Amino acid sequence: MTRRLEIVPLVQGSFYGGWATDDQLGGPSSFAYSRGIDFRKKPTQFSALPAARKESGANVVDLVQNEVMTNDGTIYALGSTGKFYKRTTAGVWSTQATLNSAGTHGLSYRRDTDCIYATSLNAVTEYGPISSSPTIKLDKYGASASTASTAYLTGGTLTTAIATTLSESSNALQSYQPDIEPCVKIGVKIIAKGTGNWTLTLHDGINNTLGTVTVANASLTNNAINYFSFSSQIRQYVKPNARTYHFHVTSTVADGTVASSTTNDLNTCDFEYWADRFVQTNNGMHPQETFLQYQVFGNGNYLSAWEPLSDVPTNAEWLRHRLTFPSGLEVCGLAVFNEYLAIACEQRSTSSLVSAQQGYIFFWDGLSSTYNYYVKVPEGSPYSLHEHKNILYYFAGGAWYGYANAAPVKIRTMPNTDSEYTDAVDQTIVYPNMATVRRGVHLLGFPSTTTNTTIEHGVYSYGSVDKNFPEVFGFSYPISTGTLTNTSGNLKIGMIKNFADTLHISWQDGASNYGVDVVDNNSDPQTSTVWQGLTFDNGQRTKLKTAVELSALFSSLTTGETVQLGYRIDGGSWVDGDVFTSGQIATLKINKRFYYISTRVTLGATISPTEVNCVTLIYNNDYHEMQG
């Protein structure tokens, strides 16, 4: 009997397979992990992708949520605190205005009106006309008065005396049925204010108090509509299923009167009912889209629709409640999908906590009185809804899905989103504008914000070399600060947008550190990128083998280019070899026993990227018994 040593090379010379689903098992030419690696340019090599660099300087002071480009190439952006930015074609950022409240992700430019529309907590701001001395019109589309006969009354020529105490008698209240909501103020025509302070008390149909407002006598005006503004929005049921509400008006001194059509009957008093344009949502989102002739807006459990026909639209032109979704839902995304508008809805209990497992995607043709159909999303909130190549994509429950008028298909479970056995609460949210396309590759910003400290923040990618190769996954662009995980609690990605050769990535990294990164044709390669091969055990995890040598073949190194090899045995710590700065081949002697082994290549670059053509692990499968 003799014994023979079997030396075997494990060679990987193509890399088009992208990230494997498992770090040991994947499709042809796949690998375990990459960061900043371009494996799509050529199927038989990988190199470094361009680096993201901060473009905004100190001029961006909040988290940019959305961008639009106008006809001359100027980009405008909306920030989380309401900052409205301009970015010139030379890449210079400046603040044009500050909205009256926080930004809520909705930003659109319409060429037919030559205006930009930006959403905030309860209104829409207009900026334009872009082509000729644009001006900002803050909250131009804000609160408005109802003109419905059930929620508006005028023309009273008589008076009603105001009492000092509240009574539920029919002549001591004014009832109404709203056609718009949420209620923000009620106006009453005061004939004589007297000497007392006035209070308006709003009740529902069973006399529960919904809100009270007191106005000091000095702030009241005789023979005019006086407004009682609530400290917060009051949600109400509107037509076609409107409920009946009523309000009372009292004074500390019984010497005031209001206009009415019947003497001493408050139920006939002159009044106005006002509602905000938007519901202030728990999720802080009012996404916006252009669909057919409409501007459409996510508005809590409504879809609002407006066809820009007049400069000051009536309530019949700006339809706050064009579609109504089940109570408790809030719109979190909009996308045009074939002939439909797709509307993603989630259930959110507070601004920071997702409270329900199931979400929905509704579909509307723009003509029907309600949505045409919907699909349930049992995995959770359907975030960052967008269309690409006639497929509707979204994130839900830590995974990325595609829908094409059949059962949704899971494209990829996002890396490190499995938080089981961590004893930690995982709250991961993806904002509406976190997907784009650059050079034919589908890019995905992930996540926007999370309490999971193992998820790497950045821009992931999904695409193929060409039609002859599969669409595969990778991690393409970390942000310029280099921070990957949210250990500080202040790491966020606001949006990603691509315009021709220009990719923008917005971020927050720290309590008050904000920026917008750019990747363009002026970008240098990423200074440090990593490729990691599949974990190898030769199909025999329980049998010892010997790793002899790791090598990589690459293009001749030039100034600033480096290659470093590394390995990890049986899940232990990484061991890295020397940094190579010249030549075309790097080797790392190992000569260690292993049950399973992982390998990696780290590239450095400053001017041009190194092209790696082959990675080889030399190992022996130990001694085999042979008959001789």
Image: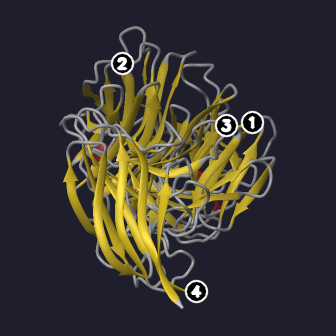
Residue bearing the label numbered 2: 135
Mark 2 or 3 closer to N-term? 2
Mark 1 or 3 closer to N-term? 1
CA gap between label 4 and label 1 equals: 71 Å
Q: Which mark is residue 467?
A: 3
Hey, what amino acid is under mark 4?
A: Gly
Residue bearing the label numbered 1: 338
Q: Residue at x 29, y 57 (%)?
A: 587
Q: From this viewpoint, which residue is outermost toward the front?
A: 628
Q: Residues within 10 Å of mark 4 (few under 14, many from 20)?
A: few
Mark toward the viewer: 2 or 4: 4
Q: Which mark is residue 432?
A: none
Hey, what amino acid is under mark 1?
A: Asn
Hey, what amino acid is under mark 3?
A: Lys
Q: With 270 as the anchor, is 501 left or right in this view?
A: left
Q: Which mark is residue 628?
A: 4
Q: Residue at x 40, y 64 (%)?
A: 455
CA gap between label 1 and label 3 equals: 23 Å
